[in-house]
Amino acid sequence: MARIIFPSDLQQLTGERETQVVASDFRGLVVELCARYSALSPERLHKYAVAIDGMIIQRPLLERFAADSELVFMGRIAGG
């Protein structure tokens, strides 16, 4: 199962620093996390960038990942 790591603000909503999911793409991940944690919503999770095995994706949507992947939610990087 893929390992998911939450930033501190999401830790306050989930009560956990990390969890594992069976999903294999980002859309499935969002569905699974929202079903597990009532305080999470797709709108909230889509405000974050996610690093999948170290590769940062600013606006994840359909990205796929392996069962042994590590995903880290993080604030989006602003440019200017």
Image (cartoon, rainbow, N blue to C red):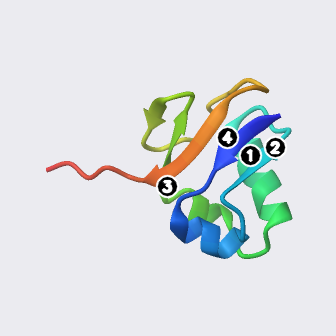
* Residue under numbered circle 4: 26
Residue 40 place in picture, x, y as percent: 69, 69
Q: CA distance from mark 4 to mark 3?
A: 12 Å
Residue at 38% across / 52% down in the picture?
A: 76
Query: What label sits on residue 21 in the rendered view?
Result: 2
What element does badge 4 sit on? helix
Disc 2 vs disc 3: which is toward the camera? 2
Q: Amino acid at mark 4?
A: Phe
Query: What label sits on residue 48 in the rendered view?
Result: 3
Earlier in the chain: of badge 2 and badge 3, it is: 2
Q: Amino acid at mark 2?
A: Val
For residue 33, which quarter of the picture? bottom right
- In the image, taking residue 14 as reference, residue 71 lies left or right, namely left
Residue at 47% across / 44% down in the picture?
A: 59
Q: Is residue 25 visible?
A: yes
Work out whether residue 47 or residue 54 is closer to the camera in this orientation and state it: 54
What element does badge 2 sit on? strand
Q: CA distance from mark 2 to mark 3?
A: 18 Å
* Residue under numbered circle 1: 29
Q: CA distance from mark 1 to mark 3?
A: 13 Å
Q: Amino acid at mark 1?
A: Leu
Q: Please say if the residues under marks 2 and 1 sit with CB atoms less than 8 Å apart.
A: yes
Q: Please say if the residues under marks 1 and 4 sit with CB atoms less than 8 Å apart.
A: yes
For residue 46, which quarter of the picture? bottom right
- In the image, taking residue 71 as reference, residue 35 lies left or right, namely right
- Figure disc tally: 4
Residue 64 place in picture, x, y as percent: 67, 27
Q: CA distance from mark 4 to mark 2?
A: 11 Å
